[in-house]
Image (cartoon, rainbow, N blue to C red):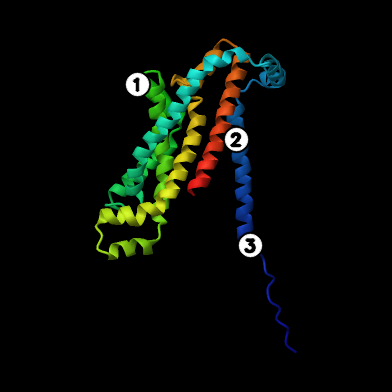
Amino acid sequence: MTETAFPARWEHRSRGARLALWFGWLGLVALFVWCWQVMTETTIWTFVADAPRQAADIGDRMFPPRLSYLPELLVPLWDTLNMATLGTLLGVILAVPTAFLAARNTTPSALLLRPVALFVIVASRSINSLIWALLLVAILGPGILAGIVAIGLRSVGFIGKLLYEAIEETDVRQIEAVRATGASPSQVLDYGIVPQILPAFWGITVFRWDINIRESAILGLVGAGGLGLKLNASLNVLAWPQVTMILLVILATVVLSEWVSARVRAAVI
């Protein structure tokens, strides 16, 4: 009489895989504990325990906001809007050629120019606008010019990355149809690629402008002008009602820019 052969029980993971997963989680927990100790070794826990009372005290001092301070914020607000708009324009001017050099289907040299363009995009996205502003204030001096250039350099990576991805996703059949008519490379670019990426370009640009308004509102903290400069001055003298007024103006500006951005993107996409 022969024994009946039963199939082996199915397991989602093998024993070795389960052990590796368990040790992986154990190592992750150990890493978290070690990082927590490093981050909190200089923490004064007395201050942390007193934080709710301090926060409540500052919140009480911030209200009501000083409405009479609003006229003094109109010029800094205008500077902030100009900083965001001109910085976005500078970013677009720099990002468009960078995107065409980075895209596989439009770059003249995949071995040389494309890696350089990708490096520019990554470098721009890796450095925060506040850091750009700190460097540029040291080079150009305090003022709105440093903020405009900082916003522009920060915008290159964002616009360039999304735009070159849009270029690579263009319909090859439309490009080949234009090329089949005997069009030159510049005509293929004008009639085969640009019309396809134009809606994405406007959507990306407006979206970045919306982001830049939020960023330009705080660049004054490092001397780049705008509302951030007023905010820094009010914080230095502990004028909390003025701080509240500035925060309300920033909030209203961001909400308005978000509404404008959404309407424009809905119209062009």
Query: Mark 1 vs mark 2: which is more N-terminal?
Result: 2
The amino acid sitting under disc 3 is Arg
Estimate the x, y position of residue 169 in percent, counting from the top left: 42, 56
Residue lying furthest right in this view? 1
Estimate the x, y position of residue 8 in percent, counting from the top left: 68, 73
Estimate the x, y position of residue 99 in percent, counting from the top left: 36, 46
Which residue does the numbered mark 2 point to in the structure image?
34
Where's the N terminus, which quadrant? bottom right
Local crowd size for mark 2, using a 10 Å CA cut-off: few (<14), some (14–19), many (≥20) = few
SS at badge 2: helix
Is any atom of residue 132 visible in this view? yes
Which residue does the numbered mark 1 point to in the structure image?
140
In the figure, 217 relative to 15: above or below?
above
Q: State the residue in front, 41 or 113.
A: 113
Estimate the x, y position of residue 198 in percent, counting from the top left: 41, 49
Which residue does the numbered mark 3 point to in the structure image?
13
SS at badge 3: loop
Q: Nearer the viewer, mark 1 or mark 2?
A: 1
Count of marks overlaid on the render: 3
The amino acid sitting under disc 1 is Leu
Query: Would residue 238 appear left or right of 5 to someone viewing this image?
Result: left
